[in-house]
Structures are given as C-alpha cells and as structure tokens.
Image (cartoon, helix red, strand yellow):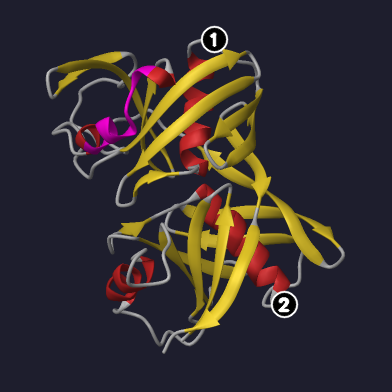
Amino acid sequence: MKFTKMHGTGNDFIVIEDLNGNFKGKESDIAQKLCNRRFGIGADGILLVRKSNIADIEMEIINADGSYAAMCGNGIRCFAKYVFDKKIVCNSKIKIATGNGIKVADLTVKNGKVSEVTIDMGTYSLNPKLIPAESEEEIINKNIIVNGKEYTITSMLMGVPHTVIFCNLDDISIEEGKYIEIHDMFLEGTNVNFCEVVSRNIIKVKTWERGAGPTLACGTGSCASVVAAKLFGYVDDEVKVMVPGGELLIKLLDKEVLMTGPAVTVFEGETV
C-alpha cells in the first residue's frame, strides 16, 4: 500500500488512494494499524481518495481509533492539495464529496504546487436533533457538571458535533475534554473546543477531538469556536484562530463559514 503523510497546522493524516475501492470494508482496521504512533506510521486519521458520481472526487475520513468522521477541516485541505498535486483533479477549484455534503476547495497554487487552501465549510446548525444531542432547546451557554466541575457549553453541528467552552486556556487541561466528549447529552459524542478570546479578530483554541484525542489543530473546531464567539458578540466576521500547530483564518458570511489554512506534504512511503 502506497501512502502520503500530510498535515494541516499539525493535524496529521495518512492519505491513501482507493480509486478502485480495494479497501472498502477494511477502513477501520487500516486506520487503527497505520495511525498508531509507536507501531505504525502515526496520524490523527486516514483520508481515502475515492471516485465520486456527484463531485470531482470523494473523501472518506477514518479517525485513529477506527471510527468514521463525516468531515474534517484540516483533513480536507490536505486532501485537496493531494488530489491536485497528484493530478487526480486538475482544477484549482475542486468539488469534494464528504459525509457532510459537497465542499468546495479553492486552491492557492505556487510553482505548480498547492500552498494554501480555502474551504467553503457550508453552514452550521444549533438544532440539538442534528448534533445529535438530548436537549429540547438549543445548547447555548448551558451549564453541565462533569467529574464534579461545572462547564458552560455551547454546542452545534459544524460538519461534525462540536462543543465550545470559553475559558482561560491556562486554567484547563486538554484531558478534561475526554470526559465531556462522552457526556450523556451527546448521543454520538462531541468534539470539545476550549476557546480563549484574545481580541475581536484573534482567538486561541485547543481541541479534544472525538475519536482522536488532543490534536494540534481542528479545522471544524476552529470554525465552531468562531461561530460561538460571534454569537456572543466577542468577535467580528474575520478571525485569526491560533491553534497549537499554527494559525487558521475563519470568515463568516451570514451562516456560511470559510476556512483558509496551509496544507503540507511530509513524506511518501509504502507499507510492507
């Protein structure tokens, strides 16, 4: 099996071409084996490149623990760079089928290679049934108790379930996200974003990702954090998000969310 290791602001992935569907039904086992950082290649997840009848190409995401993810903001930027650089899709604007619908990637190309990608992430939803969460009303500034500690949370569907907690990042441990992820309210678990507002145009975010644990960046989580910050009037419509692995730029256009950030190829190889 040939593979390419990539990252978007430190959120790393193993990209595997599966245009003939040879790995269908084996995705979970492959992800758990290859993503292991001691006994495998090491990554937060795998990205499978597949043919699509409704878009230019299809991306399937499997987390490091073998679970399926409908969408990944950092992953889709890496995916877009991969299919362009490998000449699988030669357009600088690519329609990518995902588990959360078709996303459009707008590529910045320098010397024939992709250096930066803007993704139209689509819209978010505060409807608890879509997250899905067990709540009769929108989860905005709701207090919950986890392990004896009170958190004020705001939750939404931003491609995948996300929960945002505003705080001073020095006052939390990212490991706290492990327990919030599996709170009974969230029927399929939730990603957890600890967010600190720096100014009207800058926030800091640390994310505990459902199925992957702490990551150096989360694209959908950065988007969700900006959406939540905007709901409370903390930020403007264009925000720089500082994550442990770098920076992302998030723009809000009504309910549409645009995310811009880097995509980097680390190395290529072949399993034995």
- Which disc, if any, is residue 135? none
Task: Provide residue 97's location: percent of width, then percent of height.
Answer: 52, 62
**With 89 as the anchor, is 192 left or right in this view?**
left
In magenta stretch: residue 228: no
Above or below 121: residue 201: above
Task: Provide residue 142's location: percent of width, then percent of height.
Answer: 27, 15
- Which disc, if any, is residue 87? 2
- The disc labelled 2 sits on which kind of residue? Lys
Task: Provide residue 198's location: percent of width, then percent of height.
Answer: 58, 15
Based on the displayed image, in which of its 4 quarters is residue 95 positioned? bottom right
- Look at 32% across and 28% down and name the residue there: 173
Question: Is label 2 in a helix, a strand or a loop?
Answer: loop
Report crowding for label 1: few under 14, some 14 to 19, many 20 or more residues within 10 A (C-alpha).
few
Task: Provide residue 69's location: percent of width, then percent of height.
Answer: 37, 55
State how far apart marks 2 and 1 are (Cα).
Answer: 43 Å
- The disc labelled 1 sits on which kind of residue? Gly
- Look at 37% across and 83% down and name the residue there: 23
Q: Which residues are magenta?
A: 171-178
The one nearer the camera, 73 or 113, is: 113
Residue denoted by label 1: 233
Based on the displayed image, in which of its 4 quarters is residue 169 positioned? top left
Above or below 54: residue 187: above
Name the outermost residue toward the front. Answer: 38
- Look at 63% across and 37% down and name the residue there: 247
Q: Is residue 38 visible?
A: yes
